[in-house]
Amino acid sequence: MTSTIQAIDQRLKRWDSSSDPDEELVWDDEEIAKLEPVIQAIVGTKPIRLPAREYEHDDVWRVCVASDGRAVDESASGNMPRYQGNVRLSFIKPYAAIDWYTSNDGKTWHYLSAERCPERIRLLHENLQNKLVGLGCEVLDEATLRHTLPDRTMELDGAQATVFSALFSEV
């Protein structure tokens, strides 16, 4: 894990020091466009592309899944998802992440580690991860995402930044 953290830290420093980041650091529109149909083919329904928000500098596609593991359209009447998965591309390539949430009422969502997901969701997670790797992504695991980065703090509260906050949240 140390070499991965060092590589992430080096790429972030390159980003910070560049007024015009090179192709090696940023996703191009073609690479981003390839992701949605791949997710749709695995899940079986079109993922929801989340709009960009302040202090979140990643591209996110959400998939909604019922407790039996089948994809659902959360906007359709009576289709309350039990799980939501977010497929994330960092603003710096090649990093990606997949995170899961669960809800009993469709209103309050709680983080759920991939290892604690039901088998059908874990298989979906593995399929998504394998396809992302095939597209050139480095999918970061939960331990790496929780790791703190040396000499990097968060703008909002000054706390030491984690890999997740540095790559997928704050700049």
Image (cartoon, rainbow, N blue to C red):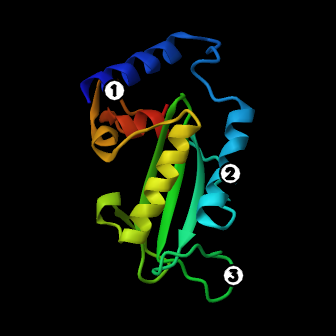
User: Residue 13 placed where, x, y %?
Assistant: 44, 15
Residue placed farthest to the bottom in the image? 78
Name the kind of residue labelled 3 in the image: Ala
User: Residue 86 placed where, x, y %?
Assistant: 51, 56
**Where residue 36 is drawn, which disc sits there?**
2
Q: Name the residue under label 3.
A: 76
Q: Can residue 34 be seen in this view?
A: yes
Task: Name above or below for residue 163 compared with residue 120.
Answer: above
Q: Mark 1 points at which residue?
A: 4
Q: Residue at x 36, y 69 (%)?
A: 119
Q: Nearer the viewer, mark 3 or mark 2?
A: 2
Which of the two residues, 37 or 106, is positioned nearer the viewer here? 37
Name the kind of residue labelled 2 in the image: Glu
Q: Which of marks 3 and 1 is in front?
A: 1
Which of the two residues, 19 or 41, is positioned nearer the viewer here? 41
**Spatial CA span between label 3 and label 2:** 20 Å
Task: Name above or below for residue 70 compared with residue 169.
Answer: below
Q: Can residue 156 be seen in this view?
A: no
